[in-house]
Image (cartoon, rainbow, N blue to C red):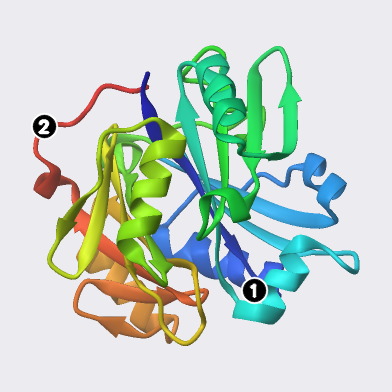
Amino acid sequence: MTMRIRQIVFAAADLAATRAQLKELLALDAPYADPGVGEFGLDNAVFALGDQFIEIVSPITGDTACGRHLVRRGDSGYMVILQTDDIDEVRSRMQFLGVRAIWQKDLDDIRAMHLHPKDIGGSIVSIDEPRPPASWRWGGPDWRVQDGAAGRQRVVGVTIEAHDPGAMARRWAEVLGLGAAHEEGALWRLPLHEGVIDFVRADARGEGVAGYTLAVADPAAVLQRARRLALVVSGQNVRLMGVEVGLRSLDSLGAERAPA
């Protein structure tokens, strides 16, 4: 069974402003607005990054999970969507471990489940199996991989803040059916297919998504645009919607992988 990062999600109070900011920062195509998120009292914008996706969600009704999250943490990382090739095995394991699903849907082209955050910790996690594997309903009917090097860009890492990073890393490994997490200096690392999830000590905001790592075609150009947008830049990191977005070059990743 494989497990890879397919979509990362930010929560933001001002969707229009953050949508425009993200589009300019990463030179992305126009986003898709998924009407289906209205079920959760949300509006959204979903951008394709290579064959992966970056989503911003914002509440449009009162008393939503996203709205409560924004009260606790402000604009911030919100959710991680992982792609599997065997959701039946995942669901069987969730039942065995007593992990609850807070939402579940089976469609012709995708089967998905959101795990209860209290049963895994740190973030809302969705596990999805698209059919065929290269498709992605949540990106909209017209999404495409950008031309040239931009189409090879991708999300390669997620960083989660935890009160006990080692314990949460081991829990994610158990729930996701992955190999053992291991300690690397001040963090714990859980390898995925073509990516990693890192767990670090939580700051005053408490547990949650602390950052994402992106491999981009031209990190210097992204940093230049970040400064033009008055975003905080530190080394190869950009502070965006309350989290640290780390930038790596495509060349640093070595041989490019085939599409999922």
Q: Position of residue 217 (x, y in %)?
A: 24, 50
For label 2, the crowd category at 10 Å Cα-Cα, with few meaning under 14, some 14 to 19 and many 20 or more, is: few
Q: Is residue 200 left or right of residue 202?
A: left
- For the N terminus, the quadrant is top left
SS at mark 2 in the image:
loop
90 relative to 108, above or below: below
Q: In this view, does 52 lie to the left or right of 113?
A: left
Q: Where is residue 245 in the image (x, y as percent from the top left)?
A: 36, 67
Q: Quadrant of residue 222?
A: bottom left
Instruction: Please count the marks in the image.
Output: 2
Q: Is residue 159 left or right of residue 54?
A: left
Between 159 and 186, which is closer to the camera in this rendering?
Answer: 186
Residue type at mark 2: give it: Ala
Q: Mark 2 points at which residue?
A: 255
Q: Mark 1 points at which residue?
A: 17
Residue type at mark 1: give it: Ala
Q: Is residue 116 left or right of residue 181?
A: right
- For the C terminus, the quadrant is top left
Question: Is residue 60 visible in the rendered structure shown here?
Answer: yes
55 relative to 34, above or below: below
Residue at 36% of width from left, 57% of height from top?
167
Q: Where is residue 159 in the image (x, y as percent from the top left)?
A: 36, 61
